[in-house]
Amino acid sequence: CLTYNPETNLCSAGELHGASTALIEFFNKYSVTTESASQTKHRDWCKIVSRLNNPKIRYVRESGTILCGGLENILYVIYELFSENADIRSDIEGIINSSHNGSAERVDSIKGLFLNILTCLASSHKISIESSALEYLPGESWLFDIFGSIILCFEAKDKKENIKLDILPKYSKFSLVSEFSAFSDDAKNELVRMQRQYNPAKNYIERIVWNYLNNSIARHNKKLPAQNYSAIVEMVDQMKAAPNHIFLCGRIDSLWYKMSIINYRLIYNTIYKLSESNQFLRITSNIIGSVCLDNPIERKMILLIPFICNPIYRDYYPRIEYNTYNLPISELGIVDVRNALSVLIGISESEEPFKKSFKNIMMHSIFNRGLFDIFEPYASFEIMCVRLVKKYKPAALLWALQHIKSSKVDHNNALDGICFLWLSYACINTPYNLEVISHLYKNIDPLKITGRYIEYMASRRGMNFNRILMVLEEGKGWLCLETNAESIAKYERMKTHFKNCDVYAAPGSSLTNPIII
């Protein structure tokens, strides 16, 4: 795309300033655009990118002919291919070697650098990023790089084309984004004619063909079936009696649709084990087989949540080598756990599968090292104290707190700190739920709330400690504080903690109005 000239309909490296001699010679030799590369063209390109004199460039094999994937690896290759372009080389060195505040900032920085370099090299094109799903993950030999996908938009002479770059650990590939591929009028008319031919459908096979034609025409009209996650879950839920309807109701080519099916079936079946002949099990096996599991983004979407919720997956899919108990933090991190809890509450149909899956999630080692980090954000409070309570009543929250306390992952009194923080959120919400407040309050030992938790609470913006004290005062009767001397002493200590939080809080950091949920 960078070398293509729409006026001459030819490729040329003339505008690629600072390009290596080998790169210029390649595009002079292969100036005519073709849909696929010949073996000779492929071999000539491999000569250009093989054995580049840069130790930071990674190859799949020791021979040095096949490049590993990874966006940073791609940028190092560009660095060597444009040895005479001092600006490009300086930008690449500056961004990649600079320090970043976390992986998210690094991804954004490298993505911006990639776009800037493409823009710099583009002579007759306008380039933009339509969308991206990139993560900083370990690749070959556990070396970190940026993997995922990015959709680039190329515009020139009133023509627009979207190209997707899939960046995998062992290779990267470009592909035309199908939703933006132009159909000819003849092709569209033929699809419409075939659609009429299969309407009404006389049997199951014709129904599948008719549905496929509908999706193809909808893609041409840029009006694809809605892929709202909750809508998909509801759709899949209606297919219990007739699993084959999966192929009739949704876009089976959609990764979101596939993810919803796998999530629903494995979480729903945490209680009852499926037989080997089960039709849904065969369907889910085929769905997993259709996904590129080498792609870390797709692998996490399809496998992570259902597999950490249901360890029986090893019996269902014995050929898949994916040990959820031995995953690196990049594969199963704190955000991934919160996402799993959110999906679990959305999908589980009753408390029994929820409790079973919650226990399975808690068995993973990340809880031993990051219990407070997992549950301290407001997003976790919303999942456990709002959505869970709304679906299964406050008793489900009490069960979850008791299970955490008994599961030997509560190190350094982390659960007391979590409940202390959640109690604060519960009190500043409007309307507040006294039963939730009671469950959280009873799981706090004020003697275990250290100065570290007080300082952390005081640093949280948006707290209203006066309102928290007011709500606790109004709920004294509910908390059974009136007649019990021990509980009165606990209440006084809790009041002291919140007053200290108010003292340490930065001026202007406290909310004047409660959060409305």
Image (tube, grey):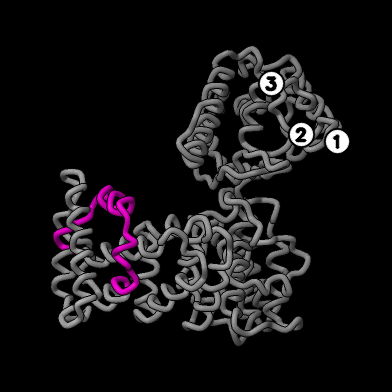
The residues bearing labels 2 and 3 have C-alpha atoms spaced at a distance of 16 Å
Mark 1 in CB contact with mark 3 (< 8 angstroms): no
**Residue type beneath disc 2:** Tyr
Secondary structure beneath dot 2 equals loop
In the image, taking residue 444 as reference, residue 299 lies left or right, namely right
Q: Is residue 158 visible?
A: no
* Residue at image location 73% in from the left, 76% down from the top: 282
**Residue 39: mark in rendering:** 1
Q: Upstream in the sequence, badge 1 or badge 2? A: 1
Relative image position of residue 115 (x, y in whole percent):
52, 31
**Outermost residue toward the front in this view:** 485
Q: Would you say residue 466 sits in the magenta stretch?
A: yes
Please tell me whether residue 49 is drawn above or below residue 14 in the rendered image: below
Relative image position of residue 357 (x, y in whole percent):
55, 74
Q: Upstream in the sequence, badge 1 or badge 3? A: 1
The residues bearing labels 1 and 2 have C-alpha atoms spaced at a distance of 20 Å
Image depth: mark 1 or mark 3 in front: 3
Residue denoted by label 3: 81
Magenta stretch bounds:
440-468
* Residue at image location 75% in from the left, 34% down from the top: 67
**Residue 485: mark in rendering:** none
Q: Residues within 10 Å of mark 3 (few under 14, many from 20)?
A: many
User: In terms of secondary structure, what is the magenta stretch mainly?
Assistant: helix
**Residue type beneath disc 1:** Gln
Image depth: mark 2 or mark 3 in front: 2
Q: Is residue 74 visible?
A: yes
Instruction: Please state which of residues 140 and 191 is positioned toward the viewer in this rendering.
Output: 140
**Residue 59: mark in rendering:** 2
Instruction: Please state which of residues 140 and 372 is positioned toward the viewer in this rendering.
Output: 372
Q: Residues within 10 Å of mark 1 (few under 14, many from 20)?
A: few
